[in-house]
Amino acid sequence: MLETMKPNRKTPVKIKPRKKSKATKKSKDIIEQMAPLVPIGETIDRIVLKEQRVIHLSGPIDESAHPYLSKLIYYLVDMDKKKPINIVINTIGGSVTDGLAVYDMLVATARNTPIHMIATGTCMSMGMILMQAATDRMATKNCVLMMHELSSANIGTVKRTRDNQDQAERLQGVLDEIIMDRSGLTRKRLDKLIDRKDAYLDADEALENGLIDHILE
């Protein structure tokens, strides 16, 4: 009598998912924290440079500057609030209101975490204001620094142009106080520097006027 052949049913092999290493998870967490506002190339730079705690601020100061800087600074403060944060700045300036948002954030951070700012290339207009928020202000030997009066377009009705002018003068007063408080410049000296012109300074002149603390040779 022939036996009925039964199919050979093998027990399915269960493949266990590979456990992620703690290092992989940590790197992923860092990327997830930074990815929303930092391009992938810069994210990699931040991971590589996290021990050096260096942030590069280049280009115009606009509405993207505050979220970009604050996210990186808060991340570094969370890692170690006593260790200095180094910001390398190279900018022609930009929006006054956006710049003041960054300035206020830097001043608040510097109360507990030292901020070292290094100007290189160009540090102009709002860039000079941001420099005054740092605990330690430095410039490279061939850096070009510049200050000037606030400029703005003023069009519209007579009442609106008057209101705009009042706001521009108020903001100019805020910027002047920041410079005078940190540099020690008198009102007369500051007015002489920026009255109706762009005041270009080399590193030696910026040091002489109290706008930086050191020159990096």
Image (tube, rainbow, N blue to C red):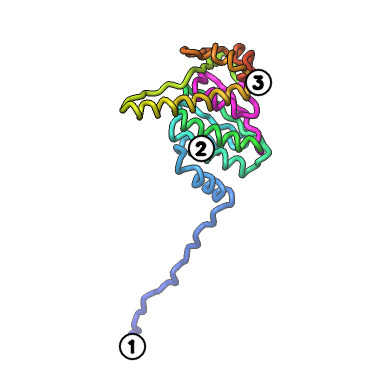
Could you tell me residue 213's position as x and y percent?
Answer: 65, 20
Q: What residue type is labelled 2?
A: Ile
Give the numbered dot on residue 189.
Answer: none
Look at mark 2 in the image and give the residue it sits on. Answer: 44
Q: Nearer the viewer, mark 2 or mark 3?
A: 3
Q: Which of marks 3 and 1 is nearer the N terminus?
A: 1
Q: Can residue 216 be seen in this view?
A: no
Identity of the residue drawn at 51% across and 23% down = 90
Write down the quadrant of residue 184 in the picture: top right
Find numbered disc 3 in the image and state the secondary structure of the residue it sits on: loop
Could you tell me residue 206's position as x and y percent?
Answer: 60, 15
Could you tell me residue 93's position as x and y percent?
Answer: 47, 24
Q: What residue type is labelled 3?
A: Asp
Q: Give the magenta range.
A: 112-138
Identity of the residue drawn at 55% across and 20% down = 120
Position of the C terminus, as image quadrant, is top right
Look at mark 1 in the image and give the residue it sits on. Answer: 1
Q: Which of marks 2 and 3 is nearer the N terminus?
A: 2
The Cα atoms of the two marked residues, 2 and 1, are separated by 73 Å
Write down the quadrant of residue 36 in the picture: top left
Q: Which of marks 2 and 1 is in front?
A: 2
Q: Which amino acid does label 1 sit on?
A: Met
Q: Nearer the viewer, mark 3 or mark 1?
A: 3
Look at mark 3 in the image and give the residue it sits on. Answer: 213
Which residue is most to the bottom? 1
